[in-house]
Amino acid sequence: MLFEDGSAFDADGIVFGTGYRLSMPWLGADIAKAGDLDDTHLDLHDHSFHPDLQGLAFLGLYDLVGPYLPVLELQARWISHCFAGLQPMPSQAEMREGVTRSKAMRAGPPSMPMNAAALMFAANAGVEPDPAKWPKLERALLFGPLSAVSFRLTGPDALGEAETRSQQAATAFGAISGAEFTAEEHGICTMISRQAATSAA
């Protein structure tokens, strides 16, 4: 590791001791009050923005089931896209609705599954891959691993090699063993289609 003062240290690993209390003593009292900060929550729209705190965003303030880094990257991309003007900020009305949802979730489940969080941030950032637009990757996107590169297929920061790398990630993960959908995969797709049709009705 190389430190800012120029010194170096060979480390076998880095341990992040995160704890379980939300502690932000550096946060101004007015900001803490706006977000109704306590030991476990800060009320934000989609865990990122607050309508009364323009020009400020928060990253990683959620309890996640699964690896954090792919999800943090997606959240950071959404925030940076908004601040860079690559897409509009959520409206005041959207953010107020988001804060209301956040308040309602205080009594709900404490953790989010990583796939739900990743898809929320990807949709917000405009980088959620549509399997129908990537027929060669449909199985990898639907049944493969939640690889960060699969969210680089589209959007302002898309990567040219994302299609190939997404397929490689799914193959390496062992999720995709052939070219055809399995009977179980067909069943899951049918169930999802029925649920979507019911929700739309």
Image: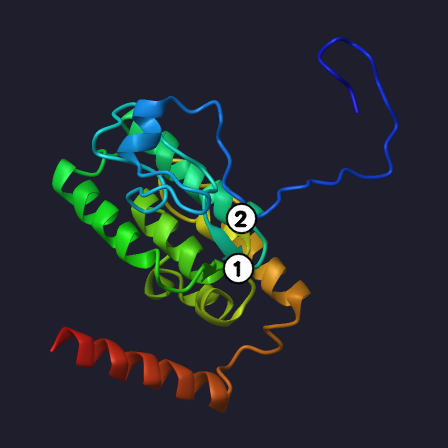
Mark 1 vs mark 2, CA separation in Å: 8 Å
Q: Secondary structure at mark 2?
A: helix
172 sits left or right of 59 in the view: right
Residue 80 horizontal side relative to residue 182, left or right? left
The residue indicated by pointer 2 is 70
* Label 1 Cα crowd, 10 Å radius (few <14 / some 14-19 / many 20+): many
Residue 162, compared with residue 197, is above or below; it is above
Which residue position holds label 1? 146
Based on the displayed image, in which of its 4 quarters is residue 144 positioned?
bottom right
Please report the residue visible at 66 percent of the width from the left and 71 percent of the height from the top: 174
Q: Are marks 1 and 2 in contact (CB under 8 Å)?
A: yes
> Which is nearer the N-term, disc 1 or disc 2?
2
SS type, badge 1: loop
Say above or below: 72 vs 173: above
**Up/down of 116 relative to 62, above or below:** below
Image quarter where the C terminus lies is bottom left
Q: Is residue 56 visible?
A: no
Q: How many marks?
A: 2
Mark 1 belongs to which amino acid? Leu
Q: Position of residue 141 (x, y in %)?
A: 46, 64
> Residue, x 40% and y 66% (percent of image)?
135
The foreground one among 132 and 118 is 118
> What colour scheme governs how the chains and residues are painted in the rendered image of this protein?
rainbow
At 33% from the left edge and 66% from the top edge, which residue is drawn?
132
Query: Label 2 amino acid?
Result: Pro
- Quarter of the figure with residue 197: bottom left
Identity of the residue drawn at 21% across and 34% down = 51
